[in-house]
Amino acid sequence: MQRVGLHLTDRCQLDCDHCLRDPGAQPVDLPLSTIAAVLAEAASEFGIRHVSLTGGEPTLHPELPAILDLAVAYGMRWDMVSNGRRFDRVACWLDEVPARRDACRWIALSLDGASDATHDSLRGAGQRREVLSAASVAVALGVPFGITTTVHARNVDELEAIAEEAEALGAGWVRFGAMQATGTPLDDELRLEPDEWRIVDARVRALRARRSIPVLTTTGWPSADEPGALCGPLRGDTLHVDVHGRLTLCCLHSQVPHQGVDPSVAGDVASGLRLVRGALAEIQRKAILARAADDDAGPWRHHACNSCLRRFGRPHWSVDGRDGPSAERPRWRGALHRVRSAKRSLPVAR
């Protein structure tokens, strides 16, 4: 067991076109008492010394400074994914208690375009400038950071430029991830076909030889070289606690549209991590066996995350487009306005 992942909150100032969170769900915060209990048991029972903080936008959790202090108290290093907005607040929290800053492994800043036009069409007006400002603040504070990019049809032509900019900003690495289906009408516009992904994979490989910083890919990246490789969640590397305080298989399943009982949930962590860890191991075992026997992946067989989302009843890509349950509503009006202002047609929801 290498780390514990905490889905701190579903709050976010943005409503990005490619976000996996169901826009019909109400924001929730993971209670500080639950976080304290999880970190204590993770450290004492499993010897875990690494915690990953996700969201939503984790900087919006009302008790984030206290969460960082808990990580420090249990001897843990922490990392976090952030959209970079109002990063000055984070800078203040890290600067006022040096131990918080010293325990930071890295902060991943989301940059989804090499131009304001591309990034802001996905995330909202002025958001790219917020990311660039956050990177400057991180450099000034000596906080390690990287750039993470979700790849899809709207930014696929800018990967080389994004990697170059990440290096120029002082990032320690740049990491590309494949967009997953969201269950919203925007999926049709942002989708890339399997043959396009093969070209993207080759381009990312080529970037590794040209850049001086590591060029990484996320878990589940569609690589033809490793179609059978197990991801961290299936290997059991991570204990992921969702925003409701439940131990779940993977952060990609958390708060994503689904129907009926959620088969990726092992149980409430209030029962104790060790107790629900047994239920999680059984979910992992069944998922590995189902993957080995999966004959339905078709041209998406190299997309491990997509195949898993399909088997667990989440939105996923198929030969006909997007399949699986739809989100309860489309993205909020501001996001739809961004689509229309970019002169793109919005597909009718299925």
Image (cartoon, grey):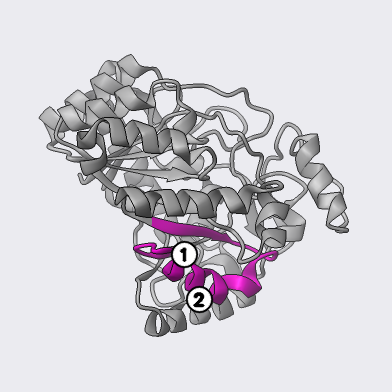
Residue drawn 53% across the image and 30% down it? 10
Q: Label 1: few (<14), some or many (≥20) within 10 Å?
A: many
Above-or-below relation of 82 to 9: below
- The amino acid type, in three-letter code, at marker 2 is Asp
Apparent side of residue 265 relative to residue 21 in the rendered image (left or right):
left
Cβ atoms under marks 2 and 1 closer than 8 Å: yes
**Residue 148 covered by magenta stretch:** yes
Mark toward the start of the polypeptide (2 vs 1): 2
Q: Which residue is mark 1?
A: 221
Q: Circle 1 sits in a helix, a strand or a loop, which is it? A: loop
Quarter of the picture containing the N terminus is top left
Residues shaded magenta: 146-174
Front in this rendered view, residue 295 or 109: 109
Apparent side of residue 101 relative to residue 58 in the rendered image (left or right):
left
Provide residue 60's location: percent of width, then percent of height.
49, 29
Q: Which residue is mark 2?
A: 201
- The amino acid type, in three-letter code, at marker 1 is Trp
Which corner quadrant of the image does residue 67 belong to? top left
Front in this rendered view, residue 214 or 273: 214
Above-or-below relation of 193 to 61: below
